[in-house]
Amino acid sequence: MSHTKQKLLLRYLIPFVCVCISVKVSAQDILVPEDSLPATDFVYHQTDDYKAFLKNIADNNAAPLDKKIQKQYLKVIEDKNSDLIDRLNKNEFIFDPVIYPYLYSIFLRAVKSNGLDPNTFHFFVSRSYEANAYTYEDGTIVCNLGLLNIIRDESQLEMVFCHELSHFLLKHSNTALIKQLETLNSDELLEQLKDIQKEQYNTKEQLEKIMLTDVFNRRKHNRAQETAADSLGMILFCKTGYGSNSVPQLFDLFDSCETNDTPLRTMKDFFTAEGLPSDDNWFKARRKMSFGEAPAKEIVDSLRTHPNCTMRKQATLAYFDQHSATGPCFSIGDINTLQQIKNIAFFDEATYIKDNNNLGLYLYDLIQNDAQFPGNNYIKTEIFNTMLSLCMHQHEHTFYKVVNQPYVPDNDKDEYAKLLKILDEVGLRDLISITIAYYEKNEVYIHPSNESITNLNQLKTI
């Protein structure tokens, strides 16, 4: 663990780190892959071996392809591999001594209980806040820290890992890429493009129609792949020894996290609790302006990135009704273990967002952290520092370099959308007033640097 991170954890998070160490997880329970040791927080020590592994897989997958698309295939995979290595070098993955071995142990249980070779896979934990896991064609499987925010037990984690293993075993990623390249190089598409080039009118509309058809077909295949991965995933899951009772709830959790409607604290509650100056209109979600008829439902549904979670839940319930898995919902650790893992992950997600200079999202994450860990000195200090930084950026006209543009949410419960709306609408003087009020309310918790005090005093004169 890096020295700076270690100091922060010891100073501010020692209560739940100690609990994590004291729960029933033992050296025998948590398994660590040899190729990740020794490791610090974010350093992967087998990069050269991993590069060789990726190249070998790419060459093997490209060998049987038609010469017409082979070169294109290798270029796409090479770009993907370069991006993966770049992300490893930029500390986007975590190899800490607590979260990583816990998650890897659950993943490895799915691999070994189904007779798969662990050497086929590389398991990484991304610091991303998005509740997601995904699989590459080479056997690299990534679990985002954000997934821990919604998971309730190890059974649900195991089902996610079994689902991702299924994508690899069914060769979904590789097959989808090859089909896409074949379509782009097909005589039919080339003829269509030639005909369009000859046209004098409506060429833009015709090209858009071709692209829409292509997107429609790819989404349709994606949905079929998700269904297939669910089906095989449940078969793999039943061999892991975990119980299936909580697994169908996964789809409710994914549905709720996609709509951002399950925050620990609303923006209005935060402003009220901290006694910050505000306007009631700030907390109302922006409304969409619509003209004409809504698009046909079947088109909208078919273009969704994720298949209908309600339908997937029903299919899962039906399967486990016939093939019940009666094991425990925890095995590597227990509910306390998972909660402490989630607490540490929650903290690291916020740090990662700050490292990427997204101060709007960082402030939102800190507000949610504050709800979970009230009275935490570090969180209170970071909220103040972030508000102060936002004031300075607004004063220097660089505000939107560190804050996402506001968007119109799909529902009234998207609190991040409300925060972006507030940041977009408040003027510099209002933002300064909010920052000063927050500092005065939480001065006992905040440990500002000399630079912060200087900046605060400077803002007071504006």
Image: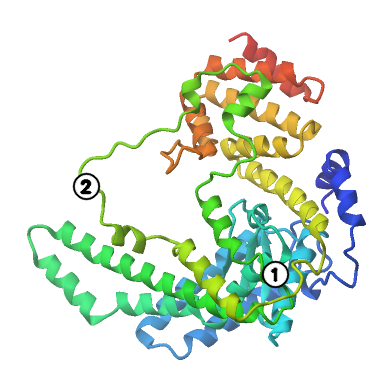
| Residue 79 in view | no
Q: For this rendering, which residue is in front, 335 or 358?
A: 335
Look at the numbered discs 1 and 2 and tell me whether their residues touch, using CB distance below 8 Å. Answer: no
Q: Is 134 on the left or on the right of 218, as rendered?
A: right
Using the image, determine if residue 205 lies above or below residue 276. below
Residue 168, how many percent across, how many down?
56, 78
Element on which disc 1 rests: helix
Q: Which residue is mark 1?
A: 47
Q: Earlier in the sequence, mark 1 or mark 2?
A: 1
Q: For this rendering, which residue is in front, 374 or 55?
A: 374
Q: For this rendering, which residue is in front, 119 or 332?
A: 332
Using the image, determine if residue 279 lies above or below residue 190. above
How many discs mark residues in the rendered view? Answer: 2
Residue 391, how many percent across, how many down?
59, 23
Please say which color scheme the image uses: rainbow
| Residue 39 in view | yes
Using the image, determine if residue 446 lies above or below residue 265. above
Which one is in front in this view, the residue at disc 1 or the one at disc 2?
2
Return the mark for residue 293: 2
Which amino acid type is shown beneath numbered disc 2?
Glu
